[in-house]
Image (spheres, rainbow, N blue to C red):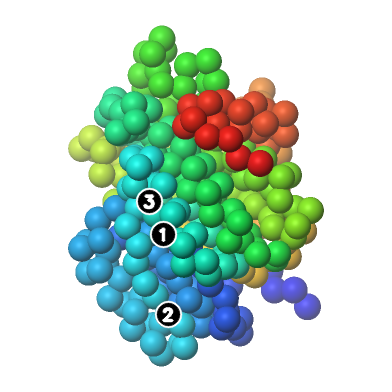
Amino acid sequence: MTQIFGAGSTTEEVLSGVSLKGKRMLVTGVSAGLGVETARALAAHGAHVVGAARNLEKAEHATTQVRADAARGGGRFELVALDLADLGSVRTCADKLNAAGLPFDLVIANAGVMATPFGHTKDGFETQFGTNHLGHFVLVNRIAGLMRPGARLVNVSSAGHRFADVDLKDPNFEQTPYDPFIAYGRSKTANILFAVAFDARHRARGVRAAAVHPGGILTELTRYMPAGGIEAMVARINEQAAAAGQPPFQFKTIPQGAATAVWAGAVAEAGVVGGHYCEDCHVSPVVPDDQAVSLVSAGVRAYAVDPAHAEALWAKSEDMVGEKFS
């Protein structure tokens, strides 16, 4: 009988009884929060986890428990340098992984930023779109040959994708007034569309891709929020929830937040999650673009899973980074 998990499930609950020995996995953003817990849970169940982080010194300190749990569970953990806001760093990381030639069974594109002040990556892209989407787009495509049949890609997105669809005509806010949450929404929509397009390209060889919403969790992701910003946002969400007859919003713990990515990557059937957006350890329904929803409602906007839209973003992304990927 298949175990049913939900919003309150933790990484340990979804991996209960699961052995990941012999599996090799890559997790980006392992210097804090969800990335650390994701790496810990996978390594604790026997996986060889490669953790990628911009600040390796910070990551070394943050992953002490990861190494301890890996040792107890028969897994392994190692770090590799990766700055998603610098495509030179991304390509160097990919080159290092390709030179090692060791295959991956799972890639979790977890790292990201949220609601940053207006700025640009080293390559001139708007910070959130460049970091959250384009950095992972180049990394994953460059190491796609290491993903063996049966492997999966899990892109960590967000219900924040409902803030905005991608803008393929003005991705860098050159004509559009900048709004930090619109920019965040665009990048999180891009994470989903990338998973849709990657899944379409690789499913014939047994490699699948999904996007996940971890839920609302208090992590370093909120560091750019102004004082009182989180409280104000929760108040707005609860107003929407009350109007829709839904219960008040509740933050998840970090182990609960990391559970959906772990579930989609290592527990759920590939054919169930492939090409889809998941939340609370299940595949989410598609919500029409014109249907009113709150951030506590379940579901993914139709524009974020539209295959033609995903292909258009893929082509635009290739143009922006100056590389073509089959």
Task: Determine which quarter of the picture holds residue 311.
Answer: top right
Residue marked by disc 1: 96
Query: Residue 67 location, x and y as percent?
Result: 34, 79
Amino acid marked by disc 2: Arg
Tag 3 and tag 1, C-beta contact below 8 Å: yes
Quarter of the picture holding the N terminus: bottom right
Picture residue at 38% right of the left edge, 51% below the top: 92
Assign a secondary structure to mark 2.
strand
Residue marked by disc 3: 92
Picture residue at 53% right of the left edge, 21% below the top: 167
Tag 3 and tag 2, C-beta contact below 8 Å: no
Mark 1 vs 2, N-terminal side: 2
Residue marked by disc 2: 76
Q: Is residue 297 left or right of residue 52?
A: right
Assign a secondary structure to mark 3.
helix
Assign a secondary structure to mark 1.
helix
